[in-house]
Amino acid sequence: MGGGTSVVAGVHGDPDGSRRLDAYAQAEAGFRIASGSLYFRLDLDIQATSAPLGLPAFGLPAFVYPEWSLLTPGIKLGPPEWAMLQIGREDHHLRLGILSHAIGMEDWDNWTNYFPTFSTMISTVPGRMLGIEPGLVLDGGYEINIFGGFDLDFYAPTFGAGLTTLQALWSTWSGVALYPTIDFYTAVLALELYPADALSVSVDGSVGLVGAADEAGTVRLRPWVGGEIIANILPRESIHPLLRLQGLHEPEGALSAFLYAPQPDVSASAGLTYAPLDELKISLEGKLSRVEGDVLPGLFALVALRRPEPPAYAVKQDAAPAEAATATARGPLRGDRAERPFTVAKH
């Protein structure tokens, strides 16, 4: 068992020239048990937010996806990150239940993200899905999977595929997801490069099509392309700086219309993360976002506590090669991706 809690608070500009304070808090609990070829995982979250919560330009977490409201105002219970049974823990597996896809750099857990705020890119990755996911682990530690079911965040049927691996000098969490009933199609390429102990570079991009109605009411598919690049400097140190640049190109504002709010076409962040203990993380972020021609500043802070949990994937491995261990050591604050599904190569 494990879990954690986190609080994000920030002050930012609004298009009308005013300043605004927003906050977001989350408590989470996780339970995992394995026996033989069976593995069960349950992760639950409860959020409390200011209402309404921030502009999408600042990516405050609860604004991105809908949650299931409880009776208490401002308190929301999101769909579980995981509530699944995995059959098979060797070279192949079958997952059933509520799944979080290993697609995209950013995760539900604030502990594993580099900055207090999310980028626009998290709005274009698959949400939590109730369905089925068969997967296959190939030689060299590459996992491919296909999935299908009902997306609890987009509230629509979905199917797609993903590729995941953790290597000595690079990693990827990439995939495609299709939503035919809501005219939404996305392909995500997420790479992390470890060129040196003093630097890791993350590249997270998406391209897709989204349905939008023209003046005559005819729905046409319109494209978008967006991405972010993150430089994590001295990632193995307890205190280290980070830089992020994000861009989005959406002709005729198709993606903003789909998300019911204008998205930033450019944003830049500079941050500092301090992790004095394995159980404590403190982050600061200064951010500038351009939304519909307005340049909006923001300053955000994160405090996160957690009780460490076992690796999320829990694939049985007799032994891992030295290069996989090196990749783990070189990993940034998100470290060995203990909160994300991944595989390592076997002898």
Image: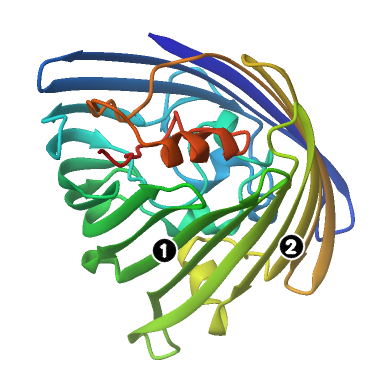
**Residue pointed to by mark 1:** 188
- Image height of 32 relative to 173, above or below: above
Q: In terms of image quadrants, where is residue 53?
A: top right
**Residue positioned 38% across, 16% down in the render:** 30
Type of residue at label 1?
Val
Answer with left or right where residue 68 lies relative to residue 331.
left
**Residue pointed to by mark 2:** 267
Q: How far apart are marks 1 and 2 (CA)?
A: 19 Å
Q: Are marks 1 and 2 in contact (CB under 8 Å)?
A: no
- Image height of 21 relative to 275, above or below: below
- Packing grade of label 2 (10 A; few <14, some 14-19, many >=20) is many
Type of residue at label 2?
Ser
Q: Position of residue 277 (x, y in %)?
A: 69, 14
Q: Where is residue 121 in the image (x, y as percent from the top left)?
A: 53, 58
Answer with left or right where residue 11 lies relative to residue 43.
right
**Residue positioned 55% across, 78% down in the render:** 250
Q: Where is residue 302 in the image (x, y as percent from the top left)?
A: 72, 29
For numbered disc 2, what is the local secondary structure?
strand
- Packing grade of label 1 (10 A; few <14, some 14-19, many >=20) is many
